[in-house]
Image (tube, coloured by chain):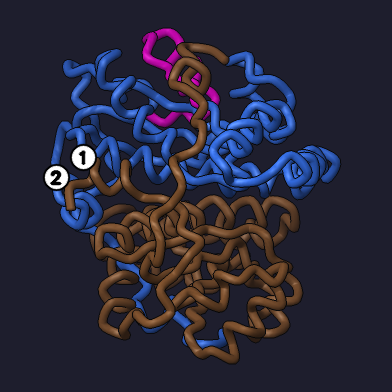
Chain colours: A blue, B brown
Amino acid sequence: METKEVIKTRRSVHYFDTARQITDEQLSELFDLVKLAPSGYNMQPWEFVVVRDPENKKRLRRCAMNQKHVEEASAMVIVCGNMNPGKYAEKIFDDWVRQGYFGERSKEQALKQVRGIWEKPEYRKIWTTRSTCLSAMLLMIAAKDMGIATCPMEGFDPEATAKEFGIPDDVMPIMLIAMGYESKPALPRVYRRPYEEIVHHEKF
Amino acid sequence: METKEVIKTRRSVHYFDTARQITDEQLSELFDLVKLAPSGYNMQPWEFVVVRDPENKKRLRRCAMNQKHVEEASAMVIVCGNMNPGKYAEKIFDDWVRQGYFGERSKEQALKQVRGIWEKPEYRKIWTTRSTCLSAMLLMIAAKDMGIATCPMEGFDPEATAKEFGIPDDVMPIMLIAMGYESKPALPRVYRRPYEEIVHHEKF
């Protein structure tokens, strides 16, 4: 689909057709696009827990203010961000050196900077939220293009979700995204703050 | 352009053609798409400071580790998030009531929840980073579709930037996005973590 059409027609969908399921092939196609999102230092801190089993969706629903569409969606994605990018940094920066992005000395400096993120408990949450949410938007765009409806959700308990789904301490659940096929047309789009209000020229 | 093509060919661009400028009409077209991003409670916390004046780009470059492409980009966008969504909440929720999304009583509950975000100093930063970064990704996708190259940047000093560009205390500079026309082809795309590593089935 044309990009403008995808952006203009994407909506947050709350009613899913429980008879139509998302396949393994679709998940693979989808996340092969999602992984192309940009990220700070190319650290790709995103981790996606895809929940399709009915019992597991029930458990997730209990972590998400009992919202019905968690169970009705074909797949729920727990979008998580790794707060400890040092974990993957060496492998990623080795590729930068190979591709001519920078030399060994710059690699050592970058490694030091990236490892420093973990040392700042408040900043590391913001850092991973930033890049992970870029991938979350790409997920919703790519899904819409594939005919799959989505709904981003922030009304859930990250601690309870982490505990239920084995998410380790250095990984932060950031949002949920419900995915599936729309079962009834959405209500009209709600108010958006206009261009004149959101864009500031030269200064705030 | 086809959505998949945009996602696959979008790259972070560091070299801009200083002779080609982004017009007012393009900015207007771009942000009319960006404003369609989803956000928590539809609060649309994003604020974009667009810097095109050469002297102002010089000032921003000084806040951004002296990176050359800040000055060479046609337009720099300071992507900010409002941490105090209560500011716009009444107007936005009135529209929800008008469109049949919920009634007056639910509106009062939602207003209370949204106003509560400001009361949590650490959470409000994560909250606004989340929704604002969804809009930032949409900006990069919409720009690419319009033939405009972008580069997201997190290497900058948010406090200095806020001071230089009159950004108020309750608004947080989250990232910079350089925009313009590419002046030389990008190096090959660097390593991406594969599907098998980023997608976890049923549990982490």
User: In the shown orientation, is residue B119 left or right of residue A70?
Assistant: right
**Magenta region includes residue A104:** no
Q: Position of residue B15 (x, y in %)?
A: 48, 65
Crowdedness near tag 2: few (<14), some (14–19) or many (≥20) residues, C-alpha within 10 Å: some
Which chain is indicated by disc 2?
A
| Above or below: residue A132 compared with residue B33 | above
Q: Do the residues under discs 2 and 1 have CB atoms within 8 angstroms?
A: yes
Residue at the (69%, 65%) spot, across then down: B156
User: In the shown orientation, is residue B84 left or right of residue A74?
Assistant: right
Q: Position of residue A149 (x, y in %)?
A: 25, 36
User: In the shown orientation, is residue B166 left or right of residue A60?
Assistant: right
| Above or below: residue A67 compared with residue B23 | above
Q: Position of residue A60 (x, y in %)?
A: 49, 21
Amino acid on which the number 1 mark rests in the picture: Asp
On residue B124, the disc is none
Helix or strand or loop: what does disc 1 sit on? helix
Residue B72 visible somewhere in the drawing = yes
Amino acid on which the number 2 mark rests in the picture: Met
Q: CA distance from mark 2 to mark 1?
A: 6 Å
**Magenta region includes residue A51:** yes
Q: Which residues are magenta?
A: A48-68
**Which residue does the numbered mark 1 point to in the structure image?**
A145
Q: Quadrant of the C terminus of chain B?
A: top right
On residue A1, the disc is 2
Count of numbered badges drawn on the protein: 2
Of residues A53 and B67, the one drawn nearer to the viewer in this rendering: B67
Residue at the (22%, 17%) spot, across then down: A21
Tell me where residue A169 sits by quadrant: top right
Q: Position of residue B67 (x, y in %)?
A: 64, 68
Helix or strand or loop: what does disc 2 sit on? loop
